[in-house]
Image (tube, rainbow, N blue to C red):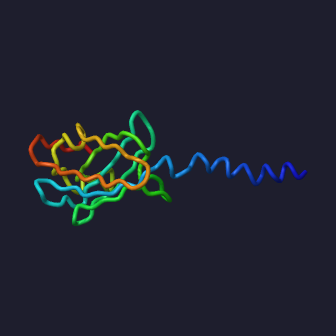
């Protein structure tokens, strides 16, 4: 009987080991375009080759912090493809609330990459407005 109680105590600890924060690094930074802050942009890190994406929204100064899960900030450690978009869908049937203002090379055809290390990461993106802007078909 004592052994079964021990398993009940150890089992949750074993599951938590897979959730260790060593697999996730804190990520924050600033998004600018032509030297000016990009407010209200969604910044998404997609780990390579696969894994849970992390997201953050820029504030009025272009600052962002990534969220990995509801209770954990950051992004999976390793290489990521990064998308930055200002297009926002909402309302009924995905109505476009705001249109894309950034070129496709930063979102639907993103060329952006970032490496996330354990610990704190300050990853800034200095973009330009040169390039074709594609609107999503919401």
Can you tell which quarter of the image residue 65 is in?
Answer: bottom left
Looking at the image, which residue sits at the far top?
49
Viewer-proximal residue among 60 and 11: 11
At horizontal 37% and vertical 42% (from top left) the residue drawn is: 46
Residue at 39% in and 49% down: 54
Is residue 69 rendered to the left or right of residue 65?
Answer: right
The location of residue 5, given as percent across then percent down, is 83, 53
Q: Nearer the viewer, residue 58 or 136?
A: 58
The outermost residue toward the right is 1
Taking the image as shown, residue 11 lies to the left or right of residue 49, namely right
The spot of residue 36 in percent (x, y) is: 13, 60
Q: Position of residue 82 (x, y in %)?
A: 30, 44
Task: Name the one closer to the observer, 14 or 118.
Answer: 118
Which corner quadrant of the image does residue 74 belong to? bottom left
- Tally of numbered discs: 0
The residue at 28%/41% (across/down) is: 113
**On screen, residue 86 above or below 78:** below
10 horizontally vs 45: left or right: right
Position of residue 108 measured from the top left corner of the image (x, y, whole percent): 24, 40
Residue at 51% x, 52% y is 21
The answer to whether residue 40 is left or right of residue 78 is left
């Amino acid at each position: 009987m004592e052994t079964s109680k021990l398993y009940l105590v150890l089992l949750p600890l074993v599951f938590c080991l897979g959730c260790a924060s060593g697999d996730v690094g804190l990520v924050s930074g600033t998004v600018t375009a032509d030297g000016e802050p990009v407010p209200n942009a969604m910044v998404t890190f997609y780990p390579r080759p696969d894994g849970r994406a992390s997201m953050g929204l820029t504030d009025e100064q272009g600052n962002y912090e990534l969220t990995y899960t509801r209770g954990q900030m950051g992004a999976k450690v390793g290489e990521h493809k990064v998308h930055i978009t200002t297009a926002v869908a909402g309302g009924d049937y995905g109505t476009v609330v705001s249109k894309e203002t950034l070129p496709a090379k930063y979102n639907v055809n993103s060329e952006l990459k970032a490496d996330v290390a354990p610990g704190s990461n300050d990853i800034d993106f200095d973009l330009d407005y040169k390039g074709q802007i594609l609107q999503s078909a919401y």
